[in-house]
Amino acid sequence: MIDQKLSATSALRDPGFEFGVATSSFQIEGATRVDGRRDSIWDSFCRQPGRILDASNGDVACDHYHRFESDLDLIRELGFQHYRLSLAWPRLIDRNGRLNTRGADFYRRLLEACHARDITPNVTLYHWDLPSDLSGGWLNRDTAFRFADYAAIAVRALGDVMPRIATLNEPWCSSILSYDIGAHAPGHEDRAEALTAAHHLMLASGLGLQAMRAERADNSLGLVLNLESLVAVSEDDQPARDLAHAERNRFWLDRLAGREPAPELMAQGRVPEQSGDAAIMATALDWLGINYYTQSQVSRADNRRGYDTTTLAGVEKTHIGWDMAADGLTELLVEFDRDYDLPPVYITENGAACDDVMGVDGVNDDQRIRYFRDHLAAVNTAIEAGVDIRGYYAWSLMDNFEWAFGYTQRFGLVYVDYSTQVRTPKSSALQWQQFLGER
C-alpha cells in the first residue's frame, strides 16, 4: 500500500495538504502543427538523427490536445484534485510576439475544464519547449526579455483561470543538460555556454515574475527546480561532490537568495552578468517547486566539469537506471530549509520509470508503488523536521514522450498504448485512488 509507512496522524493526511499529478505540454499534447503552433527546439532536436533513442518525436505523443476532456475525467476518477501542466510557448505566442488566439482558446478550454471538475491547475510557463525561431536560444540575453513578454501575455489572457503559476521547470536541464552535457535540445557541449544559459534562465524567471505581477496581483507565483542527492565516492572525491552539488542544486537557490554561487563553479565560464541582474534573479517567490527523482555518486575527473557521476552499487534501480534513494530527498529538503529562507515548498514532480508490461490483468507496477511509498514517507519526515511542504505531485499522470529516451521509458500512473491511445490505469494508479479516497 502507498500509505504503508504513514500513520493516521501523518502530516500528509492533513486536509490542506494537496496531492496532484503532473505532465508537460510537449510530452503529451501532440498536434504540433495545429492551430498556428510554431516549431520548438524539441521539434528541431527530434529531427536530428541519433538524438532520440527510438527516433521518435512529439508530433502525436498522447494526443492530449484532442483528448484532454477524458484525460481530466481520469484525473478526477483517480481522486486527484490538483493537476500540474505546462503551456507551450510556441502554441500561445506567434512569431511576431503576439497572442495566438487559437492557442489561447485551447488553453482556456483546458483550464476551464479543470475548474469544472474541481481540479485546481498548477501551470508552468516553460517546460523546455522554447520557440526554435528565437535567435540564439538561451545563449541570447534577449530571450530572457522575450520570456517576460510571454509571461505577461499569458497572464493577461489566462490569469483568471491560473491560480498558481511557475515561471520555469528545471532550469538545470535547460542549461547544463542542454548546453554542456548535450543530451537535451539544442544538444550543445560547451561548459561556458551552459553557465551563460543558466544565468539567462534565472534572469528570465525574475523578469517573468515581475511582468506577471505588473499584470495582476492575485496569482501565486513560483519556480520549479530539480534537485539531486549526491554522495562522494571517497573522502578524496568530496571536493568534486561539492562542486557537483554547487552546480546541480545550490546555484539556483543561491541566485534566488541574492548570493554569489560557488566561485569554483563560476570560474568554469564567463557569465555575462550586468548591473541589476542579481536583484532581478532574487525576485521573491510565493512558493518553490522541487522535483526529485534520484541520487548519484560523484568522483573527481579531468573533464570540463571537474567531476563525474555514476549510480551507486547495491542500490535498487528503476528501468531508466536511476537509484531509488528516498532518504536523499529528506536530506536535501532539511539542508536547504536550514541554509536558505525558503518560501512554502511543493514537491512538484516525483516518480519512477518502470519496466511496465500490459498483461491480462493490467499493469502490475509494484516497484513504482514502493517508490511512491518510500518517497511519501521521506516527505513526511521532512515535514516533521520543520520543512514547510504544502503538496506532492506524482510524475506522471500517464506514459508519454520522455525526451531523449523517446517512448522507451514509462513514468505514468496510467499505461498508454501509443498505437490506439487507449489509457489503462496501472496498479499504482489504483493504489493512489484508494489512498486518496481514505484521506
Image (tube, rainbow, N blue to C red):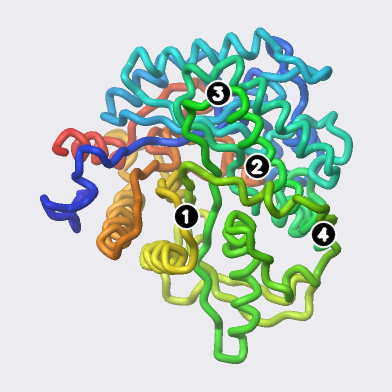
In x, y percent, where is residue 413? 38, 38
Q: Which mark is residue 33?
A: none
Question: Mark 3 vs mark 1: which is more N-terminal?
Answer: 3
In x, y percent, where is residue 391? 34, 43
The residue identified by callout 3 is: 216
Q: Is residue 316 visible?
A: no
Question: Mark 3 vs mark 2: which is more N-terminal?
Answer: 2
Q: Which mark is residue 292?
A: 1
Looking at the rendered structure, the secondary structure element under dot 4 is: loop
Q: Nearer the viewer, mark 3 or mark 2?
A: 3
In x, y percent, where is residue 425? 33, 31
Marks 3 and 1 close (CB-CB < 8 Å): no
Q: Is residue 243 left or right of residue 216?
A: right
Looking at the rendered structure, the secondary structure element under dot 1 is: strand
For the residues marked 2 and 4, what is the alpha-carbon distance in whole angstroms? 17 Å
| Front residue of 157 and 406 | 157
For the residues marked 3 and 2, what is the alpha-carbon distance in whole angstroms? 17 Å
For the residues marked 2 and 1, what is the alpha-carbon distance in whole angstroms? 20 Å
The residue identified by callout 2 is: 205
For the residues marked 4 and 1, what is the alpha-carbon distance in whole angstroms? 27 Å
Question: Mark 2 vs mark 4: which is more N-terminal?
Answer: 2
For the residues marked 3 and 1, what is the alpha-carbon distance in whole angstroms? 31 Å
Q: Nearer the viewer, mark 4 or mark 3?
A: 3
Q: Most extreme residue toward the right, as rendered?
A: 135
Marks 4 and 1 close (CB-CB < 8 Å): no
Q: Most extreme residue toward the left, as rendered?
A: 8
